[in-house]
Image (cartoon, rainbow, N blue to C red):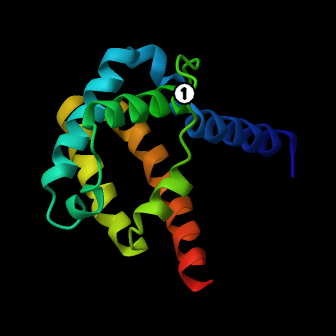
Amino acid sequence: MNDSSEKTGSVKQAGELSANRAYRELHVTLGKEKIQQVVSSFYDLIKVHPTLGGYFSEVKDWDELKDRIGHFWWIDLGGERYRQDIYNPHAVHRHLKIPPILLDDWVALFSSNLYKHLPKELADIWLARATKMAEWIGTDLQQHQES
């Protein structure tokens, strides 16, 4: 490899790394209120969703759920912790016994909600992160179904 292609390769890798970590700056761009608004709207949709809603029928305090998940996304998108509780999406989804196949419905609903509330370029960044997270949760759910 010559110097030129080595430099091009390292610039491309740096650009990919930067794009992959772009979600960590969303807290600055969006702010707590906007992140909370997106999360709140999403869970309003979940409540009545034909395939997902039933899995959340045990939720007693929707405002608390929205606050917890809003805090989770705030931290995941780069913000500093402001609540003491820790949210573990793997454990929660295992507890709810959501079939891995329904994560596609979750991603589709989350996607439409993001694009409703955010400019496309910001929704794209958050959606890429959420999709990756859904893949990890799906793998975890599948492993726990098999054991």
Q: Look at 17% across and 47% down and name the residue there.
A: 45
- Comparing 133 with 140, the one in front is 140
In this view, the residue farthest toward the bottom is 146
Left or right: 146 in relation to 37: right
- Determine the image quadrant of residue 103: bottom left
Q: Look at 39% across and 17% down and name the residue there.
A: 32
Residue 119 visible in the shown view:
no
Quick check: 103 above or below 115? Answer: below
Left or right: 58 in relation to 141: left
- Callout 1: few (<14), some (14-19), or many (20+) C-alpha neighbours within 10 Å? some
Instruction: Kindly state the secondary structure of the residue where label 1 is placed.
Output: helix
Q: Look at 41% across and 36% down and name the residue there.
A: 69
Quick check: 86 above or below 79? Answer: below
**Percent x, y of residue 18:** 62, 33
Residue under label 1: 75
Q: Please tell me how many numbered marks the rendered image carries.
A: 1
Residue 13 visible in the shown view:
yes
Quick check: 93 above or below 32? Answer: below
Quick check: 99 above or below 72? Answer: below
- Comparing 24 with 17, the one in front is 24
Give the quarter of the figure containing the C terminus: bottom right
Q: Look at 17% across and 41% down and name the residue there.
A: 44
**Percent x, y of residue 108:** 27, 57
**Percent x, y of residue 51:** 21, 67
**Percent x, y of residue 57:** 24, 57
